[in-house]
Image: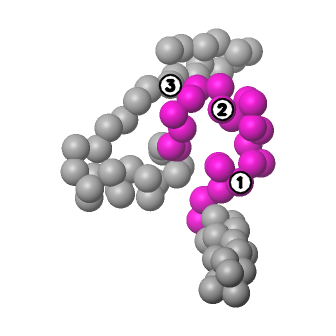
Amino acid sequence: MADVRGNRLIFSFIVLGSTNEMARKILNSPNHAEPCLVYSAAKVLLKENWVFLHGKAHADYRKALNVLFTKKALS
């Protein structure tokens, strides 16, 4: 799908990894590909949403969630 906004031409396409290793390479390159099942998700949830975090911000967010899954918290 191509969308023209101002002077920019934006393309959306689907990339499928045929193996575990290929999928990991794709997902570990956020500058080139971004996991998103629904095209409008970024517009609905906004780019600042936790769903779109990657790198250090993603790791810090997941570490903060760990306290919710301790034995004490789950009991």
Which mark is drawn over residue 41?
2
| Left or right of residue 18: residue 68 | right
The spot of residue 35 in percent (x, y) is: 50, 43
> Which residue is at 50% across, 25% downward?
12
**Residue at left offset 73%, top offset 29%:** 43
Choose mark 3 or mark 2, whichever is in front: 2
Mark sitting on residue 50: 1
Name the image quarter holding residue 24. Answer: bottom left
In this rendering, does residue 2 appear at all? yes
Q: Which amino acid, mark 3? A: Ser
Disc number placed over residue 12 in the picture, else none:
3
Tell me the magenta residue range. Answer: 34-55
Within 10 Å of the Cα at label 1, are there few (<14), some (14-19), or many (20+) other Cα atoms?
A: few
Indicate the position of residue 41 as horizontal and vertical percent values: 66, 32
**72 relative to 4, above or below:** below
Local crowd size for mark 2, using a 10 Å CA cut-off: few (<14), some (14–19), many (≥20): few
Indicate which disc residue 35 carries: none
- Helix, strand or loop under label 3: loop
Q: Identify the residue at horizontal 73%, vertical 15% (top origin).
A: 6
Name the one closer to the observer, 6 or 68: 68
Q: Quick one: 31 or 7, which is closer to the camera?
A: 31
3D distance between C-alphas at marks 1 and 2: 12 Å
> Quadrant location of the C terminus?
bottom right
Pick whichever of labels 3 and 2 is earlier in the sequence: 3
Q: Earlier in the sequence, mark 1 or mark 3?
A: 3
- Dots 1 and 2: beta carbons under 8 Å? no
Q: CA distance from mark 1 to mark 3?
A: 21 Å
Residue situated furthest front in the rendering: 75
Mark 3 Cα-neighbour bin, 10 Å: few <14, some 14–19, many ≥20: few
Mark 1 or mark 2: which comes first in sequence? 2
Q: Position of residue 15 (x, y in %)?
A: 36, 35
